Amino acid sequence: MWYVIQTLGGQEEKTADMIRRMVTPDLIQECFVPKRERLKKFEGRWNKVEEVLFQGYAFVISDRPEELYEELKQVPKLTKVLGRETDYFIALGEKEKKLIESIGNQEHKTVLSKVLAGEGKQIEVLDGPLKGYVGDIVKRNLHKREVVVQVEFMGRKMELKMGIEMVGMVRK
């Protein structure tokens, strides 16, 4: 099962590293921080960079939540384990798990989507993880080469920034 751990913004990777080091290895199958690729301009050239996709969160896959929860209490920098009920925490829902899997690759990285841009918020996705989320785009910033997609995550609406690579304009 997948579990979400809330941590301090900017400390996601450090927290995941601490979990990997401090928690008994056979309690976790994987501990990761989903990333996103985006393009950023340096010295007049577009370069790919990686940024945290879900700021303030780390994810753990485990089939032993009670024992995992007890060991997580010893890890500094955790703010809280989300979905905590009674003595341990509950798993991430299937819908949320599928969201993370559908937009990320094996390394939990959301790669750039190739798009054609048009008038207003019009975007035609040619390839990439954004393909299934075109109707959920609430903002686009072509200058920064990113769009904002609104998704439901853990019972609330969340905005995710996803990188785009513009390969042309939509023809009328």
Image (spheres, rainbow, N blue to C red):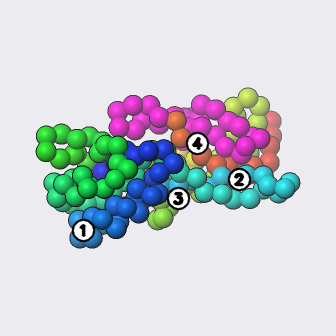
Task: Tell whether label 2 touches label 4 (CB within 8 Å).
Answer: no
Q: Is residue 11 magenta?
A: no
Task: Residue 32: name its quadrant.
Answer: bottom left
Task: Residue 47: name its quadrant.
Answer: bottom right
Residue designated by label 1: 24
User: Who comes first in sequence, dot 1 or dot 3?
Assistant: 1
Q: Is residue 33 above or below residue 117?
A: below
Tell us which disc is closer to us: 1 or 3. 1
Q: Residues within 10 Å of mark 4 (few under 14, many from 20)?
A: many
The boundaries of the magenta stretch are 133-158
Give the residue drawn at x 24%, y 52%.
Answer: 73
Q: Is residue 82 above or below residue 126?
A: above
Q: Label 2 is placed on what type of residue?
A: Leu
User: Who comes first in sequence, dot 1 or dot 2?
Assistant: 1
Give the CA separation, mark 3 to mark 2: 14 Å
Residue designated by label 4: 161
From the viewer's perspective, tell me whether residue 122 is left or right of residue 109: right
Instruction: Give how far across and how far down residue 43 sits, in percent.
Output: 84, 56
Task: Give the SS element for disc 3.
Answer: strand
Give the residue drawn at x 58%, y 52%.
Answer: 51
In the image, farthest residue toward the top:
120
Residue designated by label 3: 109
From the viewer's perspective, tell me whether residue 138 is left or right of residue 21: right
Instruction: Give how far across and how far down residue 119 sits, in percent.
Output: 77, 31
Task: Give the SS element for disc 2.
Answer: strand
